[in-house]
Image (cartoon, rainbow, N blue to C red):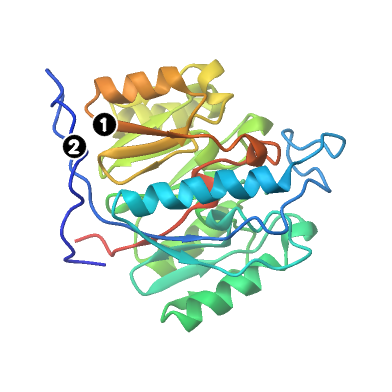
Amino acid sequence: GVGTPPVVPAPRPAPIAGTVRVARRRRYVMCRPEHFAVRYAINPWMDVDVPVDRALALRQWEELRRTYVSLGHEVLLLPPEPGLPDMVFAANGAVVVGDRALGARFAHAERAAEAGHHRAWLSAHGVAVETPEHVGEGEGDLLVVGRTLLAGTGFRTAPAAHEEAARTLGLPVVPLRLVDPRYYHLDTALAVLGDDDVAYLPEAFDAEGVATLRRLFPDALEVAADEAALLALNAVSDGRHVVLPAAAVRTADALAARGYSPVPVDLSELLKAGGSVKCCTLELHARPA
Ligand code: ARG
């Protein structure tokens, strides 16, 4: 939590011209893919006719969990529920800042029951959870950057849910409209790298969204479409180490050139449901100072 020492950085030479990036210890919630499957298709990545290897999904997920622990982070586990094959995507169940959270109201009936499990778990862990009136899928569309919430809309989260998030969490919200169904959640089109640094796919946003992002983050990393199509942006950063899908090697190189330490993890089985590193990771954010 707050006040814990920073993670010891991996031994790697400081970038020649880049900024020194500083890691902060994080708390994450993950949910084992014990019941993972692709039995319905609610985004363009999902195809019920493509077989899923659940044992492999479990091994890949375990590697992600182990990676966070080895970087010095705390990983808490939300118990998986039978009949909820997408529950592994823990990021969608809430957005948590300090001891307050906005829960989820899922856009699709297939995932609706996940919201209650998140709510119960967070309440049991001392977090006051607001139940949203409007459709909102947690950190899928609401990303904390410094003292701001970047808020996606267009496919899942309703603009009215942005207001609920601002009220509940006490942070200003910057709405961003998504326009490509492959990038249905903000966390598939934009990665938070640090308190004032992001990476994103410009083509995933409407013109106003791109203008907003260029104004707020003039030096942001803009990734190419073929990298975004590997879910390169579905990444988790502690401020220094950026855990990202292993196939996204060009994004890893671009991050290294900016002074980050990329940490590749292969989550190919979970990609069959349209999710990767960030989708599997709900952060319990410390309240920004
Ligand atoms: N199959 C899930 C869905 O379509 C994937 C969710 C991925 N999560 C994320 N944070 N983008 O809802």
Q: Are marks 2 and 1 in contact (CB under 8 Å)?
A: yes
| Residue for point 72% across, 48% down | 54
Q: Position of residue 284 (x, y in %)?
A: 39, 63
| Residue for point 48% across, 25% down | 201
| Residue for point 58% across, 69% down | 132
| Three-letter code, disc 1 | Tyr
Q: Is residue 111 above or below residue 211?
A: below
User: Which one is in front, 224 or 257?
Assistant: 257
Dot 2 crowding, Cα within 10 Å, few <14, some 14–19, many 20+: some
Residue for badge 2? 21
Circle 2 SS class: loop
Q: Position of residue 199 (x, y in %)?
A: 38, 30
User: Which one is in front, 50 or 189?
Assistant: 50
| Three-letter code, disc 2 | Arg
Q: Position of residue 66 (x, y in %)?
A: 43, 51
Residue for badge 1? 260
**Of pointers 2 and 1, the one earlier in the residue sequence:** 2
Number of on-image labels: 2
| Residue for point 64% across, 29% down | 180
Q: Is residue 160 above or below residue 20?
A: below
Left or right, 70 with respect to 130, comes to left
Q: Is residue 272 visible?
A: yes
Q: Is residue 131 visible?
A: no
Dot 1 crowding, Cα within 10 Å, few <14, some 14–19, many 20+: many
Image quadrant holding the N terminus, namely bottom left
Q: CA distance from mark 2 to mark 1?
A: 6 Å
